[in-house]
Amino acid sequence: MRAWLRHNRTGAALLGVVLLAGCTEAPAPQATSPASPVPSETPTSPPPPATELAAVPVQVAADRADAPFDEPREALIPQGWTLSVWARTDKPRLATWTPDGELLVSVPSAGRVLRFVPSADGAPEESVLLDGLDQPHGLAFAGSTLYVAQSDQVDAYDYAAGSAVNPRVIAGGLPDDRSPELRGAYSHVLKSVAVGADGAVYFSIGSTGNISAADRTADPPRATIMRVPPGGGPATPFATGVRNGTGLAVAPDGAVWTAVNGRDNVAFPEPGPQYGQVIQEYVDDHPPEQFAELTPGRELGWPYCNSDGGPADLPFIRDVQTNPDGNQMDCASLPPVEQSFGAHSAPLGLSFVDGGLPEPYASGALVGIHGSWNRQPPRPPEVSFYPWRDGEMGNQQTLVGGFQDQDGSRWGRPVAAVAGPDGAVYITDDDADAIYRLAPPG
């Protein structure tokens, strides 16, 4: 059995798998991966074990029971928890809670940011907070200041009493599908935003395509995480080689993390007759998507280097299509990536919880997994949880699953999950046009 087959992993945890890339011409084939990195130091307090999941009916009120909830749906959630359809709205994407306990949700397709006010009877009041925007996606708060990432700029607003006023541009002139030099060819136009404890603003600029190396030298560079210093100023690259860092958030210790949508159709990297060929069975499990802590100048390799192995401490190997002789980038010199998702998972929204949920979910990362479009069988959508202890990110666990049937058909695709002030988790789903409430026992 080939080495890459031995790396396959299955199961509810959907842990990351191996990754590489391809080329039809290369001076010399390379081995699948360098020696394994030295394991990170064991956390002083290991996280509690994951709770066993149970299949339970999704609770739906009659006024929210349009398709796909016109027939019974079941989800996999921790035993004793409940999952209900909290609201129905078209194409909800990323979400954040306001300082006064209201949920804001971006709807890029409509150019809107929506406001949901919880009520005692469980049916929230929905209104439009902002309208007429250019594909708003990322949302973040710093105190009473709301940051909104549009396709071509990042704005700040003063937020109070359910209104966002006094808009000002924090970073403008960002590339999108209207940029003249791109002629509409932009696969990852949506942008995300996060704010550090010091007030620095971070935002993503995705790559224009699967392999578009010119992004690295564009102005501003694409396939980056950008940083605006506290108090304002020009945005500069904080991390590079980030193909599409849609997941972007600041951890409880102040570190910036990103969940990355990796490249597609990587070629087989091992020596032999299949070297440099795109083989579907190999592509299905390569490359693992990156879940990385960012430091100033962090390089995540795209499109010249690919993470390999996993689920944790993934080394880099060269991409045999874009970097066959290693001249473009020394992949072995890059620090390993902290964590991963299974290939083609399509991680989207990322948030952190620090004491807002019961154990074993009291401290960790919540990630909306949209699921694959180009894998057979498809990578299932889910909400993932990564336990966080003593600065160490643990392995992926499924918090909510069951959106995909055995034949690959789906009734939902989570985008983002954020812990609410009531101790529940609120989950957006742009396929089912729903917002769920995942509630612990009690």
Image (cartoon, helix red, strand yellow):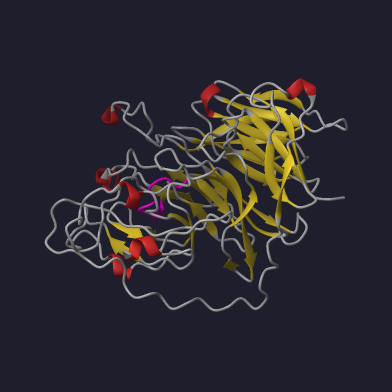
Q: Is residue 86 above or below residue 424?
A: above
**Within the magenta stretch, is there residue 240?**
yes
Residue drawn at the location 42% of the way across and 65% of the way down: 314
Residue 62 vs residue 110, the one in the foreground: 62
Q: Is 358 displayed left or right of 408 in the figure?
A: right
Residue drawn at the location 68% of the way across and 42% of the way down: 75
Image quadrant for the N terminus? bottom left
Residue 5 vs residue 306, the one in the foreground: 5
Q: Where is residue 380 in the image (x, y as percent from the top left)?
A: 53, 44
Q: In this view, does 418 lie above or below 35?
A: above
| Chain part drawn in magenta | 237-245
Q: Is residue 183 visible?
A: yes
Residue drawn at the location 48% of the way across and 65% of the way down: 338
Residue 88's image quarter?
A: top right
Q: Where is residue 223 in the image (x, y as percent from the top left)?
A: 37, 46
**Within the magenta stretch, is there residue 126?**
no
Q: Is 36 displayed left or right of 56 in the figure?
A: left
Q: Can residue 142 be seen in this view?
A: no
Q: Position of residue 222 (x, y in %)?
A: 35, 44
Q: Is 315 displayed left or right of 354 in the figure?
A: left
